Image (cartoon, grey):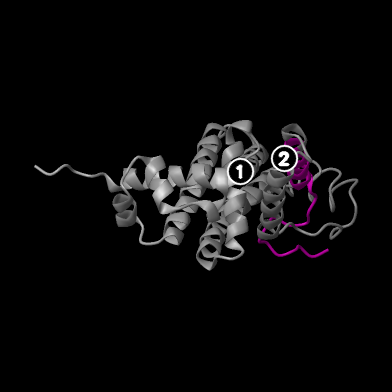
Amino acid sequence: MPKQVDYEDRRRRIAEAVCVLADAHGPEGVTMRDVAARAEVSLGAVQRCFRTKEEMLVFAVDHVGARVTERMRSRLSDSRERSAGAALEHAATEIALLRSAHRAEARVWLAFVAQAAVSEPLAARLRISYAALQGLLARLVAEAVEGGPGDPDSPGGPGGPGGPGGPGGPDDGSAAPLDPQREARALLALADGLTSHVLIGHLTTEEAEDTLRAHVVRLWEHPRTTRPGQAARPG
């Protein structure tokens, strides 16, 4: 009876081999023959899974992105009992690939980003990955701000003691509401940039984590006159 082949498992093994070789030689230095040797499969097996090298690289990008997303969702699940602000910080830290255990993954991701500048298929796949991450961060930003000190009915919020429009607070309209999508774009760009700064040694992991934490705290404590998505109340 013919042996059953688990093609998904084979594709994952090939993607892992691509990542190892891309880390060592850059995506441009990856060949299908070398990938076959690294994955311990035949060249024909690689070619049956992927028609071209570019198709193989695109799948490897998806593979790395899926691992990051899975870790992020797992960490968010573990921190479900904590504040929305803590969940946002955890998500951003995972995206930034700051842990030493993820250093190789960070190098590979940045190598793919650099290659995407001259490869539209890679660029298209990365745009999809970034859009998904931005959407998740936008949801977390909205949740963090909604339940944080900027909540209209909480201390320091627009309707609470010391908040705009509340006893002891400045006049209504002193602070603009946060746009979760805009803040998610900024946080994603910050996390992405910190990946590079840590890799080249400009920042330590601790300094990068502190930078992310400070940014999230500013979002959490931001005073605003409305909840995200609501119209401003008349002054």
Q: Position of residue 193 (x, y in %)?
A: 71, 50
Q: Position of residue 90 (x, y in %)?
A: 63, 38
Is residue 66 visible to the viewer in this orientation of the structure?
Answer: yes
Locate residue 156: give its quadrant.
top right
Instruction: Check disc 1 and report its element: helix, strand or loop.
Output: helix
- Between 173 and 86, which is closer to the camera in this rendering? 86
Instruction: Check disc 2 and report its element: helix, strand or loop.
Output: helix
Residue at the image position 72 percent from the left and 36 percent from the top: 209
Residue marked by disc 2? 198
For residue 63, side relative to residue 161 (left or right): left
Please tell me which of labels 2 and 1 falls first in the chain: 1
Locate residue 148: give its quadrant.
top right
Q: Position of residue 78 (x, y in %)?
A: 53, 32
Q: Position of residue 82 (x, y in %)?
A: 61, 33
- Between 92 and 51, which is closer to the camera in this rendering? 51
Q: Which mark is residue 234?
A: none
Amino acid type, label 1: Ala
Residues marked 2 and 1 touching at CB (< 8 Å): yes
Residue marked by disc 1? 106
Q: Quadrant of the N terminus?
A: top left
Instruction: Please report the bounds of the magenta region as a residue range.
Output: 208-235
Distance from the alpha carbon under mark 2 to that under mark 1: 10 Å
Q: Residues within 10 Å of mark 2 (few under 14, many from 20)?
A: many
